[in-house]
């Protein structure tokens, strides 16, 4: 087997102090092969405690295979000095850490970076600084953009994750530990208004960066220094990104992949961007099953082995054929197979609209909503009431709350979960296609074009795409949300005129899925997905300080003048 083998014993160096440019010292634990000489280095930076059991396992695993593994607490976390402030300090601190590593006698001069979630984010903050010592990166499930792809998806505040992250980053606790359901992992906590002071309610103190997230509800100068959208041309490093179809950050991953592929600072960087996307959520894949679906044995691959192949190539010069493979590796769900692709969206995609239809009563599973490629004619609209006091609960979907939510009062389970319990509600519009006569593959980005009106000055619209099995199970594949005040973009807010018919273009989560013959497509439309997203109170008040609640009377149009539809990336058979 042409990969590094576990032939080394391991040496451990505890709590080495790494100086930053401002004099602050960060704590690093180092795992080394117990052998003479120097080694290629893998740097991992985390706010989640660098000597947590999971990182110790990673360190030992790589050290046995001939790598020096450096696991570092971010600034202000655990054994590192300084004050933690999310995101903004990670680029410079990562750069200074590389400067320190390359001076160590055990460093060969070849350095890669690895890490999940925030550990992926730290790599993206480092990349545009173009350290001469950075050879390759391997971020896992990273949120590459922090406004519209993280805290304000579709303009809606991603509440459960933002609150949970703020608490975890400000304490030595974890949301998934025993007792969290009594303290802050419960419906009372998530329903508390105003949102701005839940930090004091949760831990008895102000969390400055949490309040700054809420104080900047448009894509303004606060977010610009840490955005990557305008920095792709400054990146000169090969990057191998792991993503999951049921994680929130797939769209962000594919934008960043395309951005560096097209604009990277060097030819080497432009031709060395790779990504693989499996049927997973934010956590490490531990089973072929996710929530209610089993994707078969091919779905379970080792993230460690993928990192090893990548670093063997770039840090050790092992000719393992990895860079001869096409740049994108997708798991096609339903067919349950891996497939290589060259571009995104796929060049052979046939973007196909599926239109909403009804006789004016698409409410719930027993309504008359339908979905088809035929454009609508003169059809009456559908109506429902959205009451923020009775929001649609977050069940399944493209969310990253799995580990933090396990011991919650009401766990938020990510992935494909039967939606029929929700679809009995009259405040969900259900549009279902006829039975498919042949397989239908959709692979790529998904957009919903919705024509809607509301009695409120501001409101939300949500959508979910489902596969309806012959058994009736309604399995969610992709979801999205849009907050009305952002219908013209993330840089400004504009409230609605009551009753105004507006066009909403909603970016839903991309996917790769084959609907089998005999199955049906389904689209659910509503106005909440809570507590994944904050409830829109329908008053137009500030998201941070609003407390007044109104019921919104919603109207969804599907007629010749207002052809509401979902645009699906159909791949010809």
Image (spheres, grey):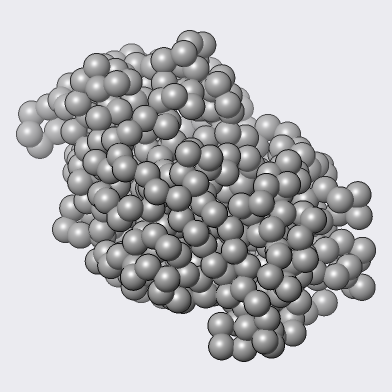
Residue 167 in the image, given as x and y percentages of width and height: 34, 26
For this view, does 80 lie left or right of residue 228?
left
In the image, 238 versus 484, the foreground residue is 484
In the displayed image of the protein, which residue is found farthest to the left?
22
Residue 360 in the image, given as x and y percentages of width and height: 68, 70
In the image, 325 versus 529, the foreground residue is 529
Vertical placement of residue 68 versus 269, above or below: above
Q: How many marks?
A: 0
For this view, does 520 lie left or right of residue 471?
left
Q: Residue at x 25, y 58 (%)?
A: 218
Vertical placement of residue 330 versus 79, above or below: below
Vertical placement of residue 449 versus 70, above or below: below
Is residue 193 visible in the rendered image? The answer is: yes
Q: Residue at x 73, y 73 (%)?
A: 359
Q: Residue at x 68, y 81 (%)?
A: 379
Vertical placement of residue 211 versus 363, above or below: above
Is residue 11 visible in the rendered image? The answer is: no
For this view, does 279 lie left or right of residue 208?
right
Residue 474 in the image, given as x and y percentages of width and height: 77, 51
In the image, 247 versus 479, the foreground residue is 479
- The quarter in which the C terminus is drawn is bottom right
Q: Residue at x 30, y 65 (%)?
A: 495
- The quarter in which the N terminus is drawn is top right
Residue 377 in the image, given as x and y percentages of width and height: 69, 88
Say which quarter of the image contains residue 441: bottom right
Say which quarter of the image contains residue 515: bottom right
């Amino acid at each position: 087997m042409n990969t590094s083998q576990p032939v080394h014993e391991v040496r451990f160096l505890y709590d080495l102090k790494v100086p930053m440019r401002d004099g602050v010292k960060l704590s690093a634990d180092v795992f080394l092969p117990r052998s003479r000489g120097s080694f290629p280095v893998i740097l991992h930076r985390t706010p989640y405690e660098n000597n947590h059991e999971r990182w110790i396992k990673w360190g030992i695993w790589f050290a046995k295979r001939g790598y020096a593994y450096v696991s570092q607490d971010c600034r202000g976390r655990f054994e590192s000095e300084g004050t933690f402030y999310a995101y903004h300090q990670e680029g410079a601190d990562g750069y200074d850490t590389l400067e320190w590593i390359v001076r160590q006698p055990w460093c060969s001069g070849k350095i890669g970076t690895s890490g999940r979630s925030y550990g992926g984010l730290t790599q993206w903050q480092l990349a545009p600084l173009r350290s001469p010592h950075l050879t390759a990166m391997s971020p896992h499930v990273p949120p590459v953009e922090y406004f519209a792809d993280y805290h304000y998806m579709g303009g809606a505040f991603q509440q459960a994750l933002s609150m949970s992250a703020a608490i975890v980053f400000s304490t030595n606790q974890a949301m998934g530990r025993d007792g969290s359901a009594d303290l802050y992992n419960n419906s009372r906590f998530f329903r508390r208004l105003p949102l701005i002071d839940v930090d004091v309610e949760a831990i008895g103190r102000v969390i400055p960066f949490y309040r700054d997230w809420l104080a900047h509800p448009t894509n303004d100068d606060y977010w610009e220094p840490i955005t990557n959208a305008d920095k792709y041309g400054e990146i000169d490093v090969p990057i191998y990104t792991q993503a999951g179809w049921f994680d929130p950050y797939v769209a962000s991953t594919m934008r960043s992949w395309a951005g560096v592929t097209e604009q990277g600072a060097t030819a080497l960087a432009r031709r060395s961007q790779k990504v693989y996307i499996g049927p997973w959520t934010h956590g490490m894949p531990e089973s072929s099953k996710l929530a209610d679906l089993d994707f078969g044995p091919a779905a379970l691959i080792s993230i460690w082995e993928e990192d090893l192949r990548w670093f063997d190539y770039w840090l050790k010069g092992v000719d393992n054929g990895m860079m001869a493979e096409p740049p994108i590796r997708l798991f096609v769900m339903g067919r349950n197979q891996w497939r290589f692709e060259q571009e995104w969206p796929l060049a052979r995609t046939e973007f196909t609209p599926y239109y909403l239809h009804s006789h004016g009563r698409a409410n719930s599973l027993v309504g008359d909503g339908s979905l088809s490629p035929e454009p609508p004619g003169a059809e009456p609209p559908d109506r429902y009431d959205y009451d923020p006091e009775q929001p649609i609960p977050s069940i399944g979907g493209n969310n990253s709350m799995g580990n933090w939510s396990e011991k919650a009062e009401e766990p938020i389970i990510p992935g494909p979960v039967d939606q029929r319990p929700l679809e009995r509600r009259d405040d969900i519009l259900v549009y279902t296609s006829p039975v498919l006569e042949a397989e239908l593959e959709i692979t790529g980005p998904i957009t919903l074009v919705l024509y809607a009106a509301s009695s409120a000055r501001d409101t939300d619209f949500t959508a979910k795409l489902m596969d309806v099995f012959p058994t009736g199970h309604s399995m969610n594949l992709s979801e999205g949300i849009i907050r009305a005040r952002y219908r013209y973009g993330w840089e400004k807010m504009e409230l609605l005129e009551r009753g105004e018919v507006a066009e909403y273009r909603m970016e839903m989560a991309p996917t790769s899925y084959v609907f089998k013959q005999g199955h049906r497509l389904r689209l659910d439309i509503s106005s909440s997905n809570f507590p994944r997203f904050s409830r829109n109170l329908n008053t137009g008040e500030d998201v941070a300080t609003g407390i007044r609640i109104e019921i919104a009377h919603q109207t969804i149009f599907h007629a010749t003048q207002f052809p509401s539809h979902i645009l699906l990336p159909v791949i010809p058979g």
